[in-house]
Image (cartoon, rainbow, N blue to C red):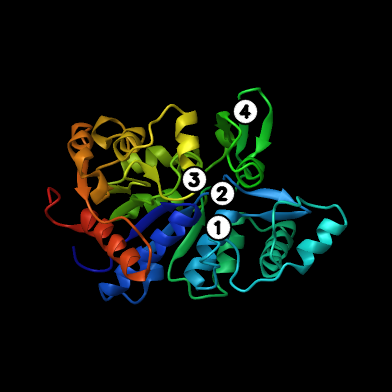
Amino acid sequence: MTGTPRIVVLAGGVGGSRFVLGVRGALRGRGIDDTTSALTVVVNTGDDLWLSGVRLQPDVDSITYALAGVNDAERGWGRQGDSERVNHELQEWGAGWPWFTLGDLDLGTHLARTGWLRDGLTPTQVLERMSHRWDLGARLLPMTDAEVDTIVVLEDGSRLHFQEWWTRHRATLAPARFENPGIDAAAPAPGLTEALAAADVVLLAPSNPVVSIGPILDVPGIRQALRDTAAPVVGVSPVIGGKVVRGMADVCLTAIGVETSAAAVAGLYGARADGGLLDAWLIAEEDEAAADEVAGLGIRSLVRPLWMTDDARRTALGEAALTAGLADDRAL
């Protein structure tokens, strides 16, 4: 193709933030300096929550901080070099959650966001305003302007906010299912379906397919927009060698009856030719034996290095994903 490609990435969590960095790096490696006009990132907001009177958007902030270069890469969340004086004071007051740490700089973000929301801005408008602070090199969109927090329903019927289940209990409590109350009445964020329709390539990041990508797809209209776009849809496996790369996505997959394997996650998304979403699926070299199984699903299987342990590897993976969608010969 000629001209600047239009890339849309669906992402959430640490894996999503690292992958988006790689896609931005790959675009710059192709000589595209104005990556903001080329790259749109649709971010999961299913794990958002209200805490101590402020609105937290963990995935939004992780991706924003990563693109800005101010994230705490070692912890995988929050701001680099942050302090926790306010968090300690909240605990002294018995406010918030003692097991959920909020850094002081991070709280500044939450306070600014909450103030703008109280002033009447939508989450889309808030994220646009946040993007003006740093040169992110991407346009960020929340999946929806509605509040559709993720609730974990345990096998005994009790219900927890996803953040309590994930952060406090480290996913050790067996989930029966995941719910996003209100999502059936939600709508895609303004400009989201238009971005998918105009895209040259759509990429599904190697994020948790159940609680990061899943809520995005469950917003009414988004799954259909993915099926309708003329752009190839290329996904990247979050499973390497039969294990999830980070977090407890295997527990989430087990809860919905899906095996923790690259081929099984491909099957969860499904082939677009059969009413699913994927045209191509990148799997790790460690999972090369699963390539035929993925192909048998009607999805083009591409074996590539998937580890994103440094900038070079992230960019190489971003380039591999772009190539899978932009190559003239899609048989590769």
Q: Secondary structure at mark 4?
A: strand
Rate crowding at label 2 as few (under 14), some (14 to 19) or many (20 or more) other CA atoms within 10 Å.
many
Residue located beneath label 2 in the image = 45
Q: Nearer the viewer, mark 2 or mark 3?
A: 3
Give the camera-side residue of 128 and 262.
Answer: 262
The quarter holding residue 281 reads top left
Give the camera-side residue of 38 and 164.
Answer: 164
Three-letter amino acid code of the residue under disc 3: Ser
The quarter holding residue 24 reads bottom left
- Measured in 3D between alpha carbons, the distance from the residue under mark 2 to the one under mark 4, in whole angstroms, is 21 Å
- Residue at position x 82%, y 59% from top? 90
- Residue at position x 27%, y 76% from top? 31
Three-letter amino acid code of the residue under disc 1: Val
Give the camera-side residue of 255 and 278.
Answer: 255
Do the numbered discs 2 and 4 sit on residues whose CB atoms are within 8 Å? no
Relative image position of residue 269 (x, y in whole percent): 35, 36
Relative image position of residue 88 (x, y in whole percent): 79, 62
- State the quadrant of the N terminus: bottom left
| Apparent side of residue 288 relative to residue 52 in the rendered image (left or right) | left
Q: Earlier in the sequence, mark 4 or mark 3?
A: 4
Do the numbered discs 2 and 1 sit on residues whose CB atoms are within 8 Å? yes
Q: Earlier in the sequence, mark 4 or mark 1?
A: 1
Q: Earlier in the sequence, mark 1 or mark 3?
A: 1
Residue 79 visible (yes or no) = yes
Q: Nearer the viewer, mark 2 or mark 4?
A: 4
Relative image position of residue 159 (x, y in whole percent): 68, 31
Residue located beneath label 3 in the image = 212
Three-letter amino acid code of the residue under disc 4: Leu
Q: Earlier in the sequence, mark 2 or mark 3?
A: 2
Do the numbered discs 1 and 3 sit on residues whose CB atoms are within 8 Å? no
Q: Secondary structure at mark 2?
A: loop
Relative image position of residue 325 (x, y in whole percent): 23, 54
